[in-house]
Amino acid sequence: QIFGLLERISRSQATVFIEGESGTGKELVARAIHKNSLRKDKPFIVFDCSSVAPNLIESELFGHTRGSFTGAVKDRIGAFEAAAGGTIFLDEIGELTSDLQPKLLRALEQREIKRVGSTKPVSLDVRVISATNKILKEEVKKGAFREDLYYRLSVVRIQLPSLRERLDDIPLLVETILSTARYNRKTDGTFYVTRVEDDALKILQRYQWPGNVRELNNILERAVSFAEKGVIKGNHL
């Protein structure tokens, strides 16, 4: 269902909102949308709202002018301008502070921004994809996230299932990860591990995966280092 939805929306200009637990692949989905869109040859800019200090987010998003604050020694564009013509992916949007939410809403509605310290508007031609591991509707109910911004971001909403909701996918995921992961490839191009025994797959399918696909990848990386004769067995897990 998700792949069918992605195929339909990728070539549109719709704003997309991705919900899912940490490790479910939200950034991969955002990259897939961009890669299959009419903007694929333009920038794809990732902005993680949880990794930037709150007092710097506005400058990092919208840019700033020289002298607008201590340390601003020259004009600097922000993530929105860097994504011109392409896509900006606002990861962990639920961490955006309450004072910045109305500024983001204004940017999305008016399709323009103002750099910190400037009164000159800058027009935007950018597609916005956002994501969170929080249940944002609950944040809206608690008053921690603006309702109007929530609806502006979630024109198209995608809910990614946790790995424990799709345990039948694990054999295919294991095969895909091991065939593409750098840690499973030798310098001559061959693989360290070429087979995973049924007992190992059954162990993986019984686990509840709080860290989702990211955790599966980490466990496989460890198992590859323990594997013997190119085979991962149950005892290696």
Image (cartoon, grey):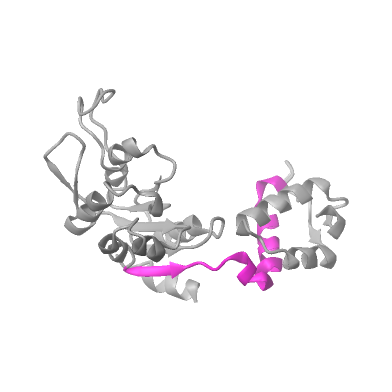
Image quadrant assignment for residue 51 = top left
Q: As drawn, which residue projects farthest toward the front? A: 142
Q: Nearer the viewer, residue 4 or 23?
A: 23
Q: Position of residue 121 (x, y in %)?
A: 14, 44
Query: Can the viewer see residue 196 in this picture?
Result: yes
Q: Position of residue 161 (x, y in %)?
A: 54, 68
Q: Position of residue 229 (x, y in %)?
A: 88, 52
Query: Can the viewer see residue 233 in this picture?
Result: no
**Please, is residue 106 above or below residue 14 in the view?**
above
The total of numbered circles placed on residues is 0
Residue 35 is left or right of residue 197, and the answer is left
Residue 10 is left or right of residue 186, and the answer is left
Q: Residue at x 38, y 53 (%)?
A: 93
Q: Nearer the viewer, residue 191 or 82?
A: 82
Q: Residue at x 43, y 74 (%)?
A: 5
Quadrant of the snapshot with the C terminus:
bottom right
The span shown in magenta is: 155-183
Q: Position of residue 69 (x, y in %)?
A: 23, 27
**Please, is residue 116 above or below residue 90 in the view?**
above
- Magenta run includes residue 163: yes
Q: As drawn, which residue projects farthest toward the left? A: 119
**Please, is residue 63 above or below residue 184 in the view?**
above
Q: Nearer the viewer, residue 179 or 72?
A: 72
Residue 133 is left or right of residue 150, and the answer is right
Majority secondary structure of the magenta segment?
helix
Q: Nearer the viewer, residue 20 or 218?
A: 20
